[in-house]
Image (tube, grey):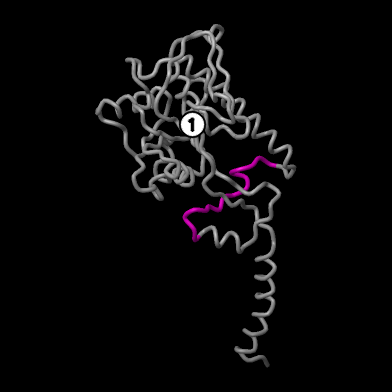
C-alpha cells in the first residue's frame, strides 16, 4: 500500500515533467513593448508625412505624434518563461496573438494585411478631416506617407494633422498650441474614433519622446490611467470634432474632457 508521501512523490514526477514541457512549448501570445513615434506634421525619411494639394496649407508649430507598439512577430515562439517575465514588467506586455495579428501564420501575408489596414486608415482619416472642414475631396487631394507602420491606429492623428495643416485652430493659431501632443485611435470616414489596444505601452512611448498630452479613445481611459507616466495628461475622445474641440479648449484655458 502506498503511503501518502510516496503517492505525492510519484504524482510530482509527471507534474514536473508536464510543467517542464509547458515552459518550453510555444504559447499563443506575443510580447510587446513601447515602439516608435512619428510627428505627422513633420517628415519621415526625408518625405513629408502629410502632403496636400488643391488647397492652401499653413506652416505649423508643435507636434502631433502617432505612437506604435513593437511586438514579437506572428511566427516567433513565446514560452511560459517569456509570459511570466512580461507579466511582471511595466515596460512589457503579454497580449493574445489574435489581438495583434489576424489569423494565419504566414508573416508575409500578415504584413500585407497590416499594410492594407494602414492604407484604409489613411483614406478614412483624409475623408474625415475634409468632411469636418467641409472641403470637397474631389478638389483637395491628401497624400499620407508612413509606409513602414502597419495597422489602423494612427487614423485619429492623421486626421488632426490634416486639420492643422489646412485650418489650424480656426483662428490663425496652431491646433497643437505649439505643444508636443501624442495620441492613438482608429477613425472612420464619419470621424468616429475607435479603440486600439496596447495603450499603456503607447503612453510610455509618447512620454519618452517628449509628449505632454495624450489623446486616447474614451473606451480605453481606464487602461491608460492604470500605468500613466507622470506628467502626461490624458484627454479622452470619441470623434474628430471632439478631439479638435478639446485641443482648442486646452489652448484657451477652457474646460477639457478628462478620463
Q: Which residue is nearer to you in this view: 46 or 24?
A: 46
Please name the residue shown 48% across and 23% down the image. Answer: 159
Q: Which residue is nearer to you in this view: 80 or 16?
A: 80
Q: Is residue 157 left or right of residue 178?
A: right
Please name the residue shown 56% across and 62% down the image. Answer: 84
Total tally of numbered discs in the picture: 1
Q: Is residue 17 above or below residue 182?
A: below
Q: Is residue 132 above or below residue 205?
A: above
Q: Look at the image and tell me in which quarter the C terminus lies.
A: top left
Please name the residue shown 40% across and 33% down the image. Answer: 181
Q: Is residue 104 above or below residue 23?
A: above
Q: Position of residue 44 (x, y in %)?
A: 56, 30
Residue 210, quarter of picture: top left
Q: Look at the image and tell me in which quarter the N terminus lies.
A: bottom right
Q: Position of residue 162 (x, y in %)?
A: 48, 20
Classify mark 1: helix, strand or loop. Answer: strand
> What span is colored magenta in the figure?
88-103
Amino acid at each position: 500500500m502506498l503511503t501518502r508521501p510516496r503517492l505525492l512523490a510519484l504524482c510530482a514526477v509527471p507534474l514536473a515533467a508536464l510543467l517542464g514541457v509547458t515552459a518550453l512549448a510555444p504559447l499563443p501570445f506575443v510580447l510587446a513593448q513601447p515602439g516608435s513615434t512619428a510627428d505627422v506634421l513633420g517628415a519621415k525619411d526625408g518625405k513629408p508625412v502629410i502632403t496636400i494639394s488643391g488647397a492652401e496649407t499653413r506652416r505649423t508649430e508643435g507636434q502631433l505624434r502617432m505612437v506604435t507598439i513593437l511586438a514579437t512577430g506572428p511566427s516567433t515562439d513565446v514560452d511560459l518563461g517569456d509570459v511570466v517575465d512580461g507579466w511582471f514588467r511595466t515596460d512589457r506586455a503579454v497580449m493574445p496573438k489574435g489581438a495583434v495579428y489576424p489569423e494565419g501564420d504566414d508573416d508575409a501575408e500578415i504584413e500585407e494585411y497590416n499594410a492594407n489596414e494602414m492604407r484604409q486608415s489613411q483614406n478614412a482619416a483624409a475623408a474625415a478631416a475634409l468632411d469636418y472642414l467641409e472641403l470637397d475631396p474631389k478638389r483637395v487631394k491628401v497624400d499620407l506617407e508612413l509606409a513602414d507602420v502597419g495597422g489602423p491606429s494612427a487614423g485619429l492623428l492623421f486626421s488632426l494633422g490634416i486639420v492643422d495643416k489646412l485650418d489650424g485652430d480656426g483662428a490663425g493659431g496652431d491646433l497643437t498650441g505649439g505643444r508636443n501632443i501624442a495620441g492613438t485611435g482608429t477613425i472612420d470616414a464619419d470621424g468616429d474614433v475607435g479603440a486600439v489596444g496596447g495603450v499603456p505601452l503607447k503612453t510610455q512611448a509618447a512620454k519618452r519622446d517628449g509628449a505632454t498630452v495624450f489623446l486616447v479613445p474614451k473606451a480605453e481611459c481606464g487602461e491608460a490611467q492604470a500605468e500613466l507616466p507622470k506628467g502626461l495628461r490624458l484627454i479622452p475622445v470619441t470623434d474628430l470634432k471632439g478631439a479638435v474641440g478639446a485641443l482648442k479648449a486646452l489652448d484657451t484655458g477652457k474646460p477639457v474632457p478628462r478620463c
